Image: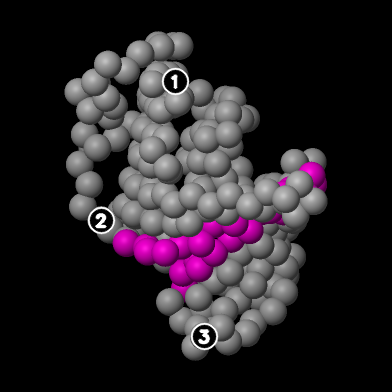
Amino acid sequence: KMIKKTLTSILLLFVSFQISFSQVNDAKANSILQNLANKMKSYSSMKIEFTYVLENKAEKINQSKSGVITIKGDKYSLNISGQRIICDGKTVWTYIPDADEVQINNVNPDDENAINPTKLLSNYSQNYRAKLIKEFNSGGIMTQVIDLIPLKGKAYYKVRINVDKTKVQILSTEIYNKNGSTYSYKVTKFTPNVKTLDSEFVFKASEFPGVEINDMR
């Protein structure tokens, strides 16, 4: 479940800007997000290398992982610390290394909790309002900070997005959970229009010798 939540968050934060923000009340934030949306929409595919950090000071938790996700339309491939999720738009393969198991599921567009980039894109503007918090210079990079507040009850109360004003590109995001945890994603490398084959978004058993396959379709 954790890896699915992690992937959902990644997709939410890196892909969801391809639509318009109909619920954004802050005109400046709206302009920034729309420019970001237009730029993201122009990419045929993207590869994002990132660092993921889970922090909860009260529980003295500080965990860091690195990962990479490649996205092409409704297809995606995620690798984070050996855990893999691959989707060809219709089927989702989730590899769990601790159990040496692959779970196979159908993509269910009607499932609110399903990992589906297209669904996240279409629903995003209806679920959040945005506000520009500040603009500042960080190491020579003019950074714009925008907070997204859920309009409906979520496990988190705020998503903060840091945008490179010049490149019109996401630098990092933080999700603030109601339980005191903060989930941070820092983009270490962003490659738009990366060359990808559709075969990269299909599970290949030959790459996981001896793995147990659990078909849950």
Q: Residue at x 45, y 26 (%)?
A: 98
Residue 73 vertical placement versus 40 (above, below): above
Q: Considering only order in the chain, which callout, 1 or 2, is on the residue closer to the N terminus?
A: 1
Which residue occupies 58% across, 49% down?
A: 63
Q: Nearer the viewer, residue 51 or 124?
A: 51
Q: Which residues are magenta?
A: 168-191
Quarter that holds the C terminus: top left
Disc 1 crowd rating (10 Å Cα; few below 14, some 14-19, many 20+) is few
In which image quadrant can residue 203 be found? top left
As helix, strand or loop, the secondary structure at mark 2 comes to loop
x then y, percent, for residue 26: 72, 70
Residue 194 marker: 2
**Marks 3/2: CA distance?**
28 Å
Mark 3 or 2: the one toward you: 3
Residue, disc 3: 139
Percent of width and height locating residue 93: 38, 25
Q: Earlier in the sequence, mark 3 or mark 1?
A: 1
Location of the N terminus by quadrant is: top right
Element assignment for label 1: loop
Give amino acid for label 2.
Answer: Val
Instruction: Left or right? Give the position of 33 relative to 217.
Output: right
Within the image, what quadrant is residue 53 found in? bottom right
On residue 99, the disc is 1
